[in-house]
Amino acid sequence: MPKPVIITCAPTGGIHTPTMSPYLPITPDQIAQASIEAAEAGASIIHLHARDPETGKPDPRAETFMRFLPRIKQSTDAVINVSTGGGLGMTREERLRAALTASPEMASLNVGSLNFGIFPMLEKYSDWKHDWEPAFLEMTRDFIFRNTFTDIEFILKELGEGHGTRFEFECYDLGHLYNLAWFVDKGVVKPPFFIQMVFGILGGVGADPDNLMHMHTIAQKLFGDQYEWSVLAAGRHQMPFATQSAMLGGNLRVGLEDGLFIGKGELATSNAEQVRKIRSIIENLGLTVASPAEARARLALKGGDQVGF
């Protein structure tokens, strides 16, 4: 029988800006509510970033995270995953600050550097809510999202070994799978591990179904039965790629971090709306959705009682 599908929801992220959707969670209250609703809709993992409550700008401060992490934990059994990707332009230390304070069950870990271009979104908007937004987007025209071998080793040691946190390994291109395989071969990363394949970011692998198939084929060759895999795709590719992953026996991620829409030209009014849509698709395919307990068991997580919040 196919394994139940693990749904991850990323409620806010650090890519989209407040101008782009009135439904993007900004404040700690909004992030907490969005996360709890997504978990109630069927997400077993919640992938979290923080934002400055006043401006909506990506915020690395641990105290901002701590305004919503305990509330989510108290209200749901979902696995809480703290991003170490942070916001584009943050230092490694800023990106790690919240996770090292929170000691979560899971954290994201980007396993390769890449050009990360979100500047094309400048063409879609003209009336900005905040002055920082267009400058933030424009900055990525000449920006490298740095994730060197030294950076990866540091995070694995400080957060993985130091806190027992396991990782959502984010792979934006084929070479990132080989980067991860190097750490696996060295015994630094031990199974079972969770690979999140990311499609559709300018600078990474394109959102072409053939690329998904090839990435999956190479991952199978490199990792065999040692890993769980999941797929996310940016923008309009979100639901088709999530569906394809489920059909192939994989897991998936949705949420307003990755795509703001629920259908063509129609903004999603909540993260839960996206979770409900993909859950309906999964169940109509004859598959089931994994519970948080099932996700914890399959990913060998330390448990919600072992976190720092």
Image (tube, rainbow, N blue to C red):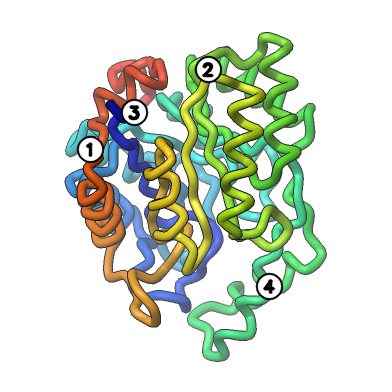
The reply to whether residue 112 is visible in this rendering is yes
Q: Give the crowd class for mark 3: few <14, some 14-19, many >=20 residues within 10 Å.
A: some
Structural distance between the alpha carbons of marks 1 and 4: 38 Å
The reply to whether residue 29 is visible in this rendering is no
Indicate the secondary structure of the residue bearing disc 3. loop
Q: Position of residue 304 (x, y in %)?
A: 30, 22
User: Where's the C terminus, which quadrant?
Assistant: top left
Q: Do the residues labelled 1 and 3 touch (CB within 8 Å)?
A: no
Q: Which mark is residue 309?
A: 3
Residue at left 28%, top 18%? 305
Q: Earlier in the sequence, mark 1 or mark 3?
A: 1
Indicate the secondary structure of the residue bearing disc 1. loop
Q: Earlier in the sequence, mark 2 or mark 4?
A: 4
Q: Nearer the viewer, mark 2 or mark 3?
A: 2
Left or right of 300? Residue 77 is left
Q: Which mark is residue 226?
A: 2
Q: Which of marks 2 and 3 is nearer the N terminus?
A: 2
Structural distance between the alpha carbons of marks 1 and 3: 30 Å
Q: Which of marks 1 and 4 is nearer the N terminus?
A: 4
Q: Which of marks 2 and 4 is in front?
A: 2
Q: Can you identify the residue that label 1 sits on?
A: 288
Left or right of 283? Residue 97 is right
Q: Give the crowd class for mark 1: few <14, some 14-19, many >=20 residues within 10 Å.
A: some
Under mark 4, the amino acid is Phe
Under mark 2, the amino acid is Gln
Q: How many marks?
A: 4
Furthest-top residue in view?
187
Q: Residue 119 carries which label?
A: 4
To which quarter of the image does residue 159 belong?
top right
Structural distance between the alpha carbons of marks 4 and 3: 36 Å
Under mark 3, the amino acid is Phe
Under mark 1, the amino acid is Thr
